[in-house]
Every structure is written in C-alpha cells, then in structure tokens.
Amino acid sequence: MLEISKKVALIVAAAVLMVVVSIIFIFRTDDNGNEIIIAQDTTIAGDYNVPEDATLVLKNDAILAITGNFDMSGSIRSEGDLNLAIAGNIYFSKDAKVVSAGNIQIVGTPDRILKTDEEIQKAFEEAGTVSENANSFGPFNDETEGDAKTLLGNIDGQASNNTQMIFMPPFVSVAYAQMADDPLGDPPEDVEVGIFQGEWSFEEGDERDRKVLILRPQPTKMRMIFDNLIITAPTAPDGESDTFNRCEARGKNGKNGLRTNFAAYQIVVNSATVNLAAGGNGGEAITKDDCAEAIAKGGNGGEPGNIKMTATEGIYIAGNFIINPGLAGDGGNARAKGGSGAQNGQGGSAYAKGGNGADNTKKLFVKGKVQLMLGRPSEFSIGEIAAGDGGNAYAEGGRGRDGEKCGEKGYKGGWARAIGGDGGNANALNGNWGSAPAYFGFGGEAEATGGQGGNGAPGTLCGAVTGAAGDGGDGGDAVEAKLGQDGGGKGAQENPYGSGIFTAVGKGGNGGDGGNGCPRGRGGTGGIGKGLQSINGQNGSHGTERCAIISEEPTDDLSQQLDTQREKNTEDELTFDPECQVPEEVLSQAYPPDVYKRTITDKNEKVEITFTRDSCVSKSEESVRRGAEVWLPDFQEYCPNTKIIDISFSGMMQPCGVTMTFD
C-alpha cells in the first residue's frame, strides 16, 4: 500500500494532540459527556479534534465550519444532512464511524454547501455526467455507443490520453506490475492532505431521498487519500403506492440511488470498498373494487447508485479498490378489479400493467491520467450486476348483474387485460479479466380473469304463476395476459437469485346460469381466455323448465274460497320425514297455493300428498302430471330419504287433482 508521507504523518500527529479549550462552551454534551451536539450553524476558528471516545452529533442540517485542520478520531452522526466545511487538512481515523440520516457534503468553505433541493438535484445529475476537462474515473454511464475497452488495457501504469468507455468486470484477478519506484512523494507546499478512513454509512429505514455524498474539500489543492475506507450507500426509497383509492391507480417510480462525487488535486486509493446504492422499487397500484373501468399501473424501478472521481493532477490506484454495484429497482405490481354491474349492468373492465424493472448497465468512463501504481499488488474489481425484475399484473373483470325483471337476461361479465412489466437490461463484456456476471431482470407475470356473467331472471318475476325466465349473461373475456419481456444486454445471463416466474394465464369468465321458468332460461356462454396459458370460461347451467296451466279467472266466491285455502296451505308442514323440509316456495312453483289445495294423509306407514284444483279444464291431467314431474327433482333434493312410489290423477272437469304416495 502507499505509505503516508512525512508531511501527512506530522499533520496527523498534530491533529491528535490538538485541544481547543476556547470553543468548548459553544457545544452541548449529553449526561455521559461523550456526545458533542451542534444544532445550529457553527464556525470554529482554528483546528478541531473529536477524540476517539466522543461522538459529534449534528442536528437541523447545521453547517459546521472549521477554519483550520480537522481530526475525526471518534464518530460523527447527523440527524439530517451532514455538512462540514473544512479549510485545512483532514484526518478520519481507521476506527472512525460516520453515519448520516441525509446527504453528506464535505467542502472547503460554508458557501460551497448546497442547501436547496434544486442545487442538490443539479449535483446529483452532475455526478452522473462525464467531465469534459478533467482526469476522471467514472461515472457508470450508458449514453455512448461503441466498442468498450477493459480497464486493465487502459490504466496500465501509463497515463490514459484518450477518453474511453469501458465495461467493468467483477471479481478480477490481482494485477501485478513490475516497476518498484513510487511516483508520489510529498505533495507541493500549497497542497493540503485529506485522509479518509473508517466506515461511512447511512441510517437505514429512513424514507428520506438521499441523493449525494460529496467530498470536495479543496478540489484544486488537496491530495485525497482513501485508506481502509468502506462506504455503504443507502437503499433508495421505494415509489409511493396507490392502493384502494381510485379507479385509475398509478404507483410512483422508485427513487434513483445516491451518487458519490469526489474531487481533489490528486486522488490516491490505497484501500477502499464502495457499496453503491440500490435503486428503489416501483410503487404498487391497486384499484378500488367498484370501478366501471379499473386501470392499475405499477411504478418503474429506480436506477442504482453511481460513482465519480475527478482530479486536477491525476488519479492513482495503489491498492485494492472494490466497487459493488447496487441492485436496480424492481417494477411495482399492479392489480385492477372491475366493479359488479358497474357498466350499466355489465361487469366493469380491468386493465393492469406491471412497472418495468430498472436497467443496470455498467459502462465506466475513464479519462485522462488514471494509473495503477506499478510495483504494488493492486486489485480493482466490481461485484455482480443485477437489473430489476418487472412487476406482476393481475386484472379481474367485474361480475355482470343478474336479470331483475320478467324475462331479463343476465348481463355480461367485464373483460380483463394484464401485462407484466419488462425486466431491466444488464451489460457485461469479455475482456482481459474474463466475463462480468451480469444478470438481466425477469419479466413480470400476468393473470387476467374475465368477469362472471349474471344469472337470468326467474320466471316467478313475471307476476304470474310462472313465466318466461331470462338467459344467463355471457362471461367476460380475458382479452390478453402477457408476460413482461425479460431484459437482455451484452453478456447478461439469467439471474440465479431471481424469481424466474413464467406465468401468463388468461381465464375467461364463466357464463351466468339461466333462470327457472316457462320456458326456462339458457345458460350464458363462457368467456374466451387468451394468454400463454389460455382457459375458456365454463358455460352457465340452463334453468329448470317450470310450467303450470292457469285456469280461467275464478268467480268472486271461488276467490274467497282460495284465499282461505292459501292461508291453510301456508300452515301445512311435511311431517312424514323429520329431515324433509321442503320450502314453501318450492312447492308453490309447481302447485301454487292460490290454485291448488294441499292435504297430507297418513295411510299404512305411507304418506299421501294430494293437490286438488277446483277449476279444471279438459287437459288438466296432462298439465298436472307435467307440473308434478317438474317439481319432483326439487322435492328429492330436499327429501333424499323419501321415495315417491306412485302418482295418480283423479277427476275430470271439476274438481280434479293429483295424489303422490311416499314411502
């Protein structure tokens, strides 16, 4: 590893011994005396040291400005943005702990601290843009087409003279060079030194959108040294979900991962691991359940983090430098459900589209003087590259309304369409160090289900003894169930850790049942299913034919007599089988109480039920027998242990009746 020069060693020693008594009164400590709290913008004249047993706590996005040197031997924690303005040398010990709830900015003077959202967003975008007039390492970028070079062929101990875009292979073998001389000595007298060590991280579980980690203390006059440094960027927030609130639900896109931007006179990497941020997942979208047109679209996944380094004099990789790309965000799931009878009786339609997974394409720009320190065992590597999976999509058409008046057909079920989100792309390239393990994102699954058709109206709604029943409504179609497209990319392969779901089911809705009546209603036709797996809906069942002859209008005296009979019929119960309870409406469909009188008689361990009609016509026997045949299936459904052993008809003209004998 590169040894720290004499000048740097003296700076470190002086910082450790430093005590600034004159400024202690501006800080507030906790009960244990080991926390130093700064809750407002503060300037310290001269040098400042945080001892190894103390923690510096910054609140309210306060800016701590130090006009001299800064020694962080302890820990620093911010409850908001971590803002430091340091004019002199900087030293973070190897045991230093840096934890931030927000962005991190370490600059030279307070006026360089970015404060507004617009300023920070601009810095975020700049960290993803190639610098035109600087020696630069990064960012990862996918804007330029053309053949890519490997890093080893670019920084081979000589300065890079041309702009090149290179794919970064992952676990590369150690590259040993031959020259033993160290080209770096003490920096010039006007160049400060910043040594950055320890563990740097961000509070997890925080929904804040952390965008930048900026280290630009004195970009034109500082040698920045990374030694025993571990940076772990936070996972970006997921997109906001939109659930059960609207008929057009849209999940928000996942946030893009934090970007790091380091700038100095020189940058030297002795030993550093940078764990880039994962992109946020797209937000989920779920519609309400009563929609005439239900539309749900999941949010897209966010991009992973990025890294950029620029240096006026040059960038030197003297030891191990490991970059672990963050995961690209997955697309959000979408679920749409049409309402029952929501479109003037027809079931509501449903369309669902899963969000797209984010790309994770690692093309790294290296420009100008970027060198491996020859004569030292140096390793540059990058971890696995994984794109985001597409979101799943589920659509369900609404049920058609049942027929509600005489002869009315049931309404058609709603159609459904579901399209899974596309998986993200990932890129890898065969180079001097072999292939990078890059994994494309899987496409999201899809399931579309057409709505159930409504049932036809029963004939009893016709206002007569029995009338024409309605047909069942047709089932809704699953017009499309489409898998999201798997991502691709040069050299990308299937992710062994991914879900690998390959399901796209289109299921047509079942047809509604026909109503019972005379004539009976026919069952509706099942809907058509279209998808990778297509399932047509089942046809609805036909209704039962239930007819009865209605005689001429009775006289007033007969009407009064029938009213008395109707009251008596309501009180009758089937007593011959304790388990046999035939509902009155079942008996009345074939033998309505306003026309037939019913009597029950016990005879020699058998039971006779006689239905007598006072006003008959010449064809009464045929109509009564047909009425009995219609009623028998319903009777046997309620009385499975009772056998009908005889049906007899008696009488011509008036009165007439039918007698059923049960065992």
Image (cartoon, helix red, strand yellow):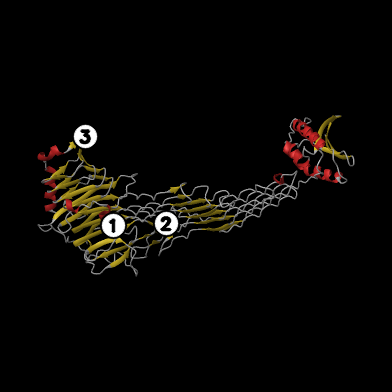
Q: Quadrant of residue 361?
A: bottom left
Q: Seen in the image, is 195 located left or right of residue 212? A: left
Mark 2 and mark 1 in contact (Cβ < 8 Å)? Answer: no
Please state which amino acid type lies under the numbered disc 3: Asp
Image depth: mark 1 or mark 3 in front? 3
How far is mark 1 from mark 2, CA to CA?
Answer: 21 Å
Residue 147 left/right relative to 423? left
Q: Position of residue 134 (x, y in %)?
A: 21, 64
Note whether 36 is above or below 340 in the view shown: above
Q: Residue at label 1?
A: 307
Residue 375 in sight here: no
Check disc 1 and report its element: helix, strand or loop.
Answer: strand
Whole-percent x, y for residue 62 in the image: 21, 45
Q: Quadrant of the C terminus?
A: top right
Sort mark 1 into few (<14), some (14-19) or many (20+) by Cα contacts within 10 Å: many
Q: Which residue is mark 3?
A: 30
- In this orientation, which residue lies closer to the viewer: 199 or 397? 397
Which residue lies at the image location 31% right of the left edge and 55% below the top edge?
323
Say which of marks 1 and 2 sits in front.
Answer: 2
Q: Badge 3, how many Cα within 10 Å: few under 14, some, many 20+? A: few
Residue in the picture at 83% in, 43% down: 624
Eyeballing the image, is 200 above or below 189? above
Q: Position of 501 compared to 642: left or right? A: left
Mark sitting on residue 357? 2
- Of callouts 1 and 3, the N-terminal one: 3
Q: Amino acid at mark 2?
A: Gly
Label 3: state its secondary structure: loop
Find numbered disc 2 in the image and state the secondary structure of the residue it sits on: loop
Tell me how far mark 2 sits from mark 3, CA to CA. 46 Å
- Asked whether the residues under the numbered discs 2 and 3 touch, taking CB atoms below 8 Å apart as contact, a structural biologist would say no
